[in-house]
Amino acid sequence: MIKKILLILLLFFGPNNLSYSNENDCSQFKKLSVKYIKCKSSSIKDKTISVGKNIVEDTKNYQKKEWSAEKEKLDKIKKKVLEKWIIKRI
């Protein structure tokens, strides 16, 4: 019975480890080697770029949300001004 449970747990949680394979494993290199430094620098670069993209997207979404009401107010004012200008021209 214990063997069956262990087998089921192994089959259930085993594939999840493959999803973490995208990260670089720099532990296979010596810490003072050039390959280790390149590996670490590329992982730092990738993380920095992904964080930067997230910040930019969050900022865009925040600006759209916050400025949508103000933009509507400006559009209403533009319409009023244009209406008054058209009436004066007639």
Image (cartoon, rainbow, N blue to C red):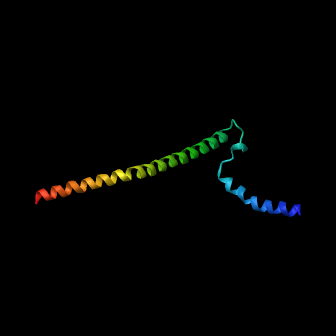
Near-viewer residue (49 or 41) = 49
Q: Residue at x 64, y 39 (%)?
A: 37
Of residue 62 and residue 46, the one placed in the foreground of this image is 62
Q: Position of residue 54 (x, y in %)?
A: 52, 49
Q: Quadrant of residue 78?
A: bottom left
Report the residue at 19% width, 58% height from top. Answer: 83
- Seen from the viewer's position, the closer of residues 46 and 59 is 59
Residue 9 falls in image quadrant: bottom right
| Whole-percent x, y for residue 4 in the image | 85, 64
Q: Residue at x 21, y 54 (%)?
A: 81
| Left or right of 76 on screen, residue 64 | right
Q: Is residue 31 left or right of residue 50?
A: right
Please tell me whether residue 59 is drawn above or below residue 89 in the rendered image.
above
> Which residue is painted at 20% across and 56% down in the image?
82
Left or right, residue 70 beside residue 62: left
Quarter of the image where the C terminus is located:
bottom left
Q: Relative to residue 85, is residue 53 drawn left or right? A: right
Task: Count the marks.
Answer: 0
